[in-house]
Image (tube, helix red, strand yellow):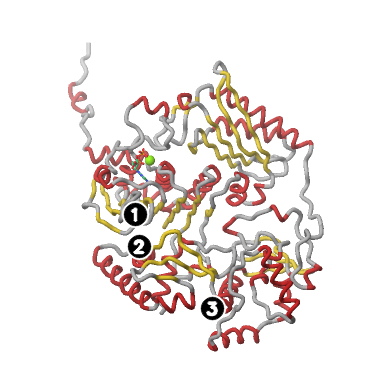
């Protein structure tokens, strides 16, 4: 009988305990699989902190920078030392709490993980505090004591150089299409579920463009609203929103299933090749492949065209029926009586689709005269036909030019100053516009300064009457792409470069309202120096180190001094109000009913100082 060779035993692998930092990094790589997972975790933290406004900035698909700012309750100063240690959380204290957990986070792993695979900086202020704190973390630990700093309400978390120490992961991510579209997708989903929260997501500005010009607009930009359909319309666009059916279902029989579901599903007029399924279970953004498949089958079986659905669905179950702890990124949850619930939803969707199929409607370009809006001038009584139902239709907020072409206030020229030909005409024109435009400004529209008047004269002398007529009379049809809008004038269609048109409009508005602007009052005045610092940091993220910080501080300080010196003039001519402590509290309204993107104020102030 052969006995096994003793050499083989020697070759058996030896088990050894991994170094803690290795363990942590491996675990971190599981929680933060890609930049989009970091964004999701950070946004969930902001939601858990009862924020009403969350803005995200992403550079290089998130590998260079992810920055999430919220206006939530902030983090207590005394919690900062352990904030990024693994398994430190304010949301769970004992295992049983998991059964009734309402918050999205509970493991206290996300921030910790980010510090093992990236450089994390937290700026936060809690209610009633005079100043906030900023502190950076590496490998779960603070790199230094928290530094006092000026801060706006809430928390800002910045993750830089994600996966700097995971070469293979970084390379794969760099080679694959960047995560930015995934990030925009996740934020769009949050935006249509949490409709009482405003979301924005954008890349940092590449160059210093004036903030009004909007060339680097947010790619998600939702404002808090009370209507889910409005939210869907502003995020996913009109073509989705107008083809949705409301859906609701519930069951309350513990022997079968207990749940409540509501949502919107696309009808038979919606034809696309890819399913969009936005699913929230107990307010968690999750995926459920079984439910998705079940609904896709219904769509392909019921509808004539092989169309894929758009589905937004929110399912609420008793917390103890949901196991939220089955996936490292919490992407999936497991439900009690999952099959029964899916079946119920599936048959409801099927019957609704069959009904909608029977009463299938076709989008027609009906020509109907515009509703009875007061006309601005005599010419206006021959308004061009507007697309049907344009009053209630909306385009995505970030693509919005004028939402309502049939409304005189929605016409471009309602904003343009026109020399009245006679007194009567001026009166009727003003009443009409005033009825719908928030009009509070001084009637005397132009400043008395000759230099400004000269610039206005140049504009007036160069004015092309034919083009002016087109702009004045046209009907806005829609955006052809990000830059060009389709305008209809009589029987002609025109492509107009909206970016250029807006720049020109803003410029002319500034001249015409010079020294007579109305004000946008900021809810809290904001420290100039801090804002300029923000802009400088966004501008030059590549440069690191304290020396550069010092330089930036100096630039910010000098610009603030300069603007403070010019405060009186800025206020009188431009309605930019800066108090003696260097806080900004008012900005001019260039266009009525248009609020500029406030995220871009730092950049605007930097321009203002630099270009003086
Ligand atoms: P979890 O969310 O599972 O608790 P995290 O690592 O994501 O774990 O966050 C740790 C803790 O940090 C949270 O429990 C919360 O108290 C605090 N926190 C994180 N982000 C924010 C934020 N944006 N606002 C307020 N508190 C936050
Ligand atoms: Mg969390």
The residue carrying mark 3 is 514
Q: Earlier in the sequence, mark 1 or mark 2?
A: 1
Q: Nearer the viewer, residue 124 or 281?
A: 124
Q: Residue at x 76, y 49 (%)?
A: 363
Left or right of residue 302: residue 231: left
The residue carrying mark 2 is 541
In this rendering, the count of numbered labels is: 3
Q: Is residue 306 visible?
A: yes
Q: Nearer the viewer, residue 111 or 71?
A: 71
Say whether marks 1 and 3 touch (CB < 8 Å): no
**Is disc 1's CB within 8 Å of ligand 1?**
no
Using the image, determine if residue 79 lies above or below residue 426: above
Q: Residues within 10 Å of mark 2 (few under 14, many from 20)?
A: few
Q: Residue at x 46, y 27 (%)?
A: 319
Question: If the image is split into quadrants, where does the C terminus sit?
Answer: bottom left
Q: CA distance from mark 1 to mark 2?
A: 9 Å
Report helix, strand or loop for mark 3. loop
The residue carrying mark 1 is 160
Report helix, strand or loop for mark 2. loop
Q: Earlier in the sequence, mark 3 or mark 2?
A: 3
Residue 351: x and y in percent read 71, 30
Q: Residue at x 54, y 33 (%)?
A: 289
Report helix, strand or loop for mark 1. strand
Residue 440: x and y in percent read 59, 68
Say whether marks 1 and 2 touch (CB < 8 Å): yes
Q: CA distance from mark 3 to mark 2?
A: 36 Å
């Amino acid at each position: 009988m052969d006995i096994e060779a003793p050499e083989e035993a020697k070759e058996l692998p030896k088990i050894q305990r991994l170094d803690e930092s290795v363990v942590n990094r491996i675990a971190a790589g599981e929680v933060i699989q890609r930049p989009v997972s970091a964004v999701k975790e950070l946004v969930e933290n902001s939601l858990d902190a009862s924020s009403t406004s969350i803005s995200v900035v992403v550079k290089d698909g998130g590998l260079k920078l992810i920055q999430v700012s919220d206006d939530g309750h902030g983090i207590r100063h005394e919690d900062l030392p352990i904030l990024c240690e693994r398994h430190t959380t304010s949301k769970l204290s004992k295992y049983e709490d998991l059964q009734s957990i309402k918050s999205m986070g509970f493991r206290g792993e996300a921030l910790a993980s980010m510090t093992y695979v990236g450089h994390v900086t937290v700026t936060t202020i809690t209610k009633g505090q005079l100043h906030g704190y900023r502190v950076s973390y590496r490998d779960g630990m603070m790199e230094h004591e928290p530094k006092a700093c000026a801060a706006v309400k809430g928390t800002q978390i910045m993750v830089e150089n994600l996966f700097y120490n995971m070469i293979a992961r970084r390379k794969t991510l760099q080679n694959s299409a960047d995560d930015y579209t995934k990030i925009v997708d996740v934020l769009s989903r949050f935006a249509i579920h949490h409709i009482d929260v405003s979301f924005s997501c954008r890349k940092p500005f590449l160059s210093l463009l004036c903030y009004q010009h909007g060339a680097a607009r947010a790619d998600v930009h939702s404002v808090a609203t009370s209507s889910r359909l409005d939210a869907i319309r502003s995020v996913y666009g009109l073509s989705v929103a107008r083809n949705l059916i409301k859906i609701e279902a519930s069951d309350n029989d513990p022997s079968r299933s207990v749940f409540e579901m509501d949502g919107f599903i696309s009808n038979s007029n919606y034809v696309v090749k890819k399913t969009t399924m936005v699913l929230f279970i107990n307010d968690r953004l999750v995926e459920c492949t079984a439910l998705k498949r079940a609904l896709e089958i219904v769509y392909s079986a019921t509808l004539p065209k092989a169309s894929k659905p758009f589905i937004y669905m929110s399912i609420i179950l008793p917390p103890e029926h949901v196991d939220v702890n089955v996936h490292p990124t919490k992407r999936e949850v497991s439900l009690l009586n999952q099959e029964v619930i899916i079946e119920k939803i599936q048959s409801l969707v099927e019957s609704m689709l069959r009904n909608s199929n029977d009463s299938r409607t076709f989008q027609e370009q009906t020509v109907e005269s515009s509703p009875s809006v007061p006309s601005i001038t005599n010419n206006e009584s021959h308004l061009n036909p507007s697309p049907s139902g344009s009053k209630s239709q909306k385009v995505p907020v970030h693509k919005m030019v004028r939402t309502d072409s049939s409304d005189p206030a929605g016409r471009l020229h309602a904003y343009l100053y026109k020399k009245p030909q006679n007194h009567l005409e001026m009166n009727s024109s003003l009443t009409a516009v005033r009825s719908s435009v928030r009009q509070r400004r001084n009637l005397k529209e132009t400043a008395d300064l000759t230099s400004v008047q000269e610039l206005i004269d140049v504009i007036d002398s160069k004015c092309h009457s034919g083009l002016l007529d087109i702009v004045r009379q046209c009907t806005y049809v829609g955006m052809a792409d990000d830059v060009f809008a389709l305008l209809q004038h009589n029987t002609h269609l025109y492509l107009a470069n909206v970016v250029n048109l807006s720049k020109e409009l803003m410029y002319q508005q500034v001249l015409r309202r010079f020294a007579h602007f109305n004000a946008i009052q900021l809810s809290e005045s904001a420290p100039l120096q801090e804002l300029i610092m923000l802009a400088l940091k966004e501008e030059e993220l590549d440069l690191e180190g304290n020396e550069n910080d010092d330089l930036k501080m100096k630039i910010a300080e000098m610009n603030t001094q300069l603007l403070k010196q010019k405060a009186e003039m800025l206020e009188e001519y431009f309605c930019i109000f800066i108090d003696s402590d260097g806080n900004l509290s008012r900005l001019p309204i260039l266009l009525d009913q248009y609020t500029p993107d406030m995220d871009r104020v730092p950049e605007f102030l930097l321009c203002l100082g630099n270009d003086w």
